Amino acid sequence: MGKRIGMEVAVAVAEAVGLCNIDMAAVYPITPQSHIAEHLSDLVADGKIDAEFVTVESEHSAMSAVIGSSGAGARSYTATSSQGLMYMHELLPIASAMRLPITMAIANRAVSGPLNILNDHSDIMPQRDSGWISIFVENGQESIDMSIIAFKIAEHKDVMLPVNINIDGFQLTHMVEPFEMPTQEEVNKFLPPFVPHATLHPAKPVTMGAFAMSDYFTEIMKAKDEALKNSKKVILEVWDEWAKLFGRSYKPVETYKADDAEVLMLTMGSMGETAQMAIDELRAKGIKAGLIKLRLWRPFPFEEIKASIKNAKKLIVTDRANSFGGPGGPVFSEIKSALYAETQRPLIYNYIYGLGGRDVPVGDFTGMFEKVLADTANKQADTYEFWGVRE
């Protein structure tokens, strides 16, 4: 196995990408993603990886550049955060519609205004319907693993879709953690050279992303939807292959002490490890609490969600973003929708928390459980609340 080392997570992500034999990267720096861009450019400039690092003037240009390079058959990578991701927004559906296997890291950060550089999930949630495979990680090791895995998923002949890896800004990107870094030989064994399905080349002109009238547009959108849903099979296969080679397994929905839990909590991203500590404290008090970690955001893992909550009486869905003027957080809405037709489902509660990087200690998680357990009349079920708002 790879050497166990300690390193800042953002720098480690760049190192992992450097092991993937990329052909081209176009990354515009933005806090807290900048260390990925800076270190990746260093690797190219120092001759440690044979790739082109394209210096661009904006995130919009970065996404435009990787769309072009991927269309030309190059293994392409980018990374961004917050306002940068918003600036890319108009191009994201184009990348997925053209079936371009781009890999992108997102150092999740609050979207302005007011200006905030710290972590929540308000940048990725508006991109939910852009047609990208979307994965959340919980720690540094997962950040490295998924950065490599993403290329294999994206480039699979039955997928050919872009992938974004969501890494909580500062709370993960700037942490120094111990992890195993795969060797170049191991990555070469896992990740074969990229063989594009179709490429742009002057010697053989093709049309990509052409104009479509209404008599074809609906069919094209359905094809895109089917491709994203069908990618789940390949995602599971690639994760299984990774587990066999490296001993670290991943699932669309992962659980902690959930089998006999009467009250469950669902988290996404780095908050899961803190929530686990709350589960342990509650279990020590005799409370049957458990945790669900949602890793695969798109395609949405309906069956796994249903299976993980089937024995619970109450479910706490946590969100690090809000759908303003809507029914609550976006994850809450998704979970309610997924369970709508179930004859037996838990009562669902929603807490929106940790916005703009606000600290969420273990006591806050236990407090959420205690508040839900105290709601014996179930009056707060199917509602949302901003957790910890000062009066």
Image: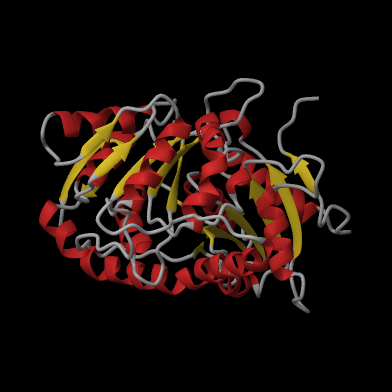
Residue 211 on image: x %, y % = 56, 55
Q: Residue at x 63, y 40 (%)?
A: 364
User: Up-down: is 313 above or below 168?
Assistant: below
- Asked if residue 332 shows in the view, the reply is yes
Residue 56 drawn at (x, y percent): 36, 27
Q: Residue at coordinates 65% horizontally, 49% vertically from top-left?
A: 318
Q: Is residue 102 left or right of residue 337?
A: left
Work out which quarter of the rendered image holds the N terminus and state it: bottom left
- Answer left or right for 46 relative to 154: left
Between 255 and 131, the residue placed more toward the observer is 131
Q: Nearer the viewer, residue 303 or 152?
A: 152
The relative height of residue 239 versus residue 115 in the rendered view (above or below) is below
Question: Is residue 172 visible in this depiction of the protein?
Answer: no
Up/down of 261 relative to 326, above or below: below
Quadrant in which the C terminus appears: top right
Q: Nearer the viewer, residue 223 or 287?
A: 223
- For the residue pair 353 and 283, the one nearer the viewer reads as 353
Q: Is residue 177 left or right of residue 127?
A: left
Residue 241 at x, y percent in the picture: 28, 70
Q: Position of residue 219 (x, y in %)?
A: 61, 70
